[in-house]
Amino acid sequence: MANVKQTDILTGSIPRQLLAFFLPIWFGTLFQQLYNTADTLIVGNFVGTRALAAVGATGAFVNLLVGLFVGLCSGVGVVVSQSFGARDYDGVDRQVHTALVLSVAIGALLTVLGVVLASLITGNPYLTAAGTGYVNLSMFFAFATLYPDAQVLLFFFIPVKIKWMAILDACYFAYIIFFCAASRYWIGVVLPLVALLNFFVFFAPEIGRFAKREQTRTKQAAHFHNAVRQTQREQQSQGYRHKCAVCGRTDVTNPELQFRYCSKCAGYHCFCSDHIFNHVHFTDENP
């Protein structure tokens, strides 16, 4: 949590902090309404009036589930607020990620139960599963964002990381959107886009932080490789392999010394045994 930018809603401009807190909730509610609109549009045009009436009849049950998750989110908000007020940022990180994983798991479980029950009632498993397919695929992006290096066994014996499966998922989304757009089937374009927008609303800050971390890591790697090449050129021209960055002694002038590289310094710097634990670390600002 130390290298993550914190947003403290307890200080600063009150209207700005309220907007930052309000907009994600508002967008989530908007996309939930878009789901209802898409369901009404598709069912009313392609299934029939009876199916449309059935969608309206299940509104109370859907509102019950939404109210359940809103209550759970309120409980999580209380726990997170207490930890944040106590400046327990490790606790905040643990509680938020636990809540996200539980939300994805419970949502997937309810989706599976809903598909099974609706298929048993209607006898039409294809249309029932197709209505939730894009939502399930977009939920997989949430898990891949939180745990990109987690590994699963494909077909029970092929190890595959979650991030590579997420890339395949993104390719599938792109194929569906392109194919439907080329066929002028605009409903088929809107449905996956709405599912993806729902993901981006909640995970856009996490994606931005990940992009910044990757950019910083790339710069550090480039700086390290440049320092390695420069050190190797110096070694080849002056005939030594190791040189202390503090006192300048080398393995040629002082063969009795041992030399080590510091992992906390920015770049590729070597130190003798007298200075490996007694030196000022090099940084990007002070190379």
Image (cartoon, rainbow, N blue to C red):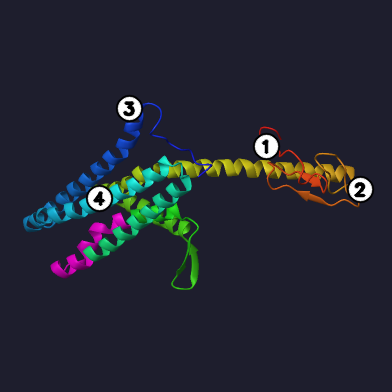
- Name the magenta segment's main secondary structure: helix
- In percent of width and height, residue 118 lies at 17, 65
Give the CA distance from mark 2 to mark 4.
Answer: 70 Å
Between label 4 and label 3, give the one nearer the viewer.
4
* Three-letter amino acid code at the position of disc 1: Thr
Could you tell me if residue 173 is visible in this image? yes
The answer to whether 57 appears left or right of 10 in the picture is left
**Mark 3: which amino acid?**
Pro
Percent across and percent down for residue 120 are 17, 70
Residue position for label 2: 254
Does 192 sit left or right of 101 as displayed?
Answer: left
Instruction: Assign a secondary structure to mark 1.
Output: loop
Q: Say whether residue 44 is left or right of residue 162.
A: left
The residue drawn where x is 26% and y is 52% is 69
Query: Rounded to the nearest whole Å, what is the CA distance between mark 2 and mark 1?
Result: 27 Å
Query: Which residue, given by chain and number where applicable, does mark 3 sit on?
Result: 15
Secondary structure state at the residue bearing disc 2: loop
| Amino acid type shown at disc 2 | Asn
Tell me the residue that label 1 is attached to: 283
Q: State which quarter of the image contains the C terminus.
A: top right
Marks 2 & 4, CB-CB < 8 Å contact: no
* Disc on the earlier residue, 2 or 3: 3
Q: CA distance from mark 4 to mark 3?
A: 25 Å
Residue type, mark 4 in image: Gly
Please tell me whether mark 1 or mark 3 is closer to you in this view: 3
Region in magenta: 115-137
The residue mark sitting in front, 1 or 4, is 4
Is tag 2's residue or tag 4's residue first in the polypeptide sequence? 4
Residue 218 lies, with reference to residue 97, above or below; the image says above
Which percent across, then down, holds residue 243? 84, 44
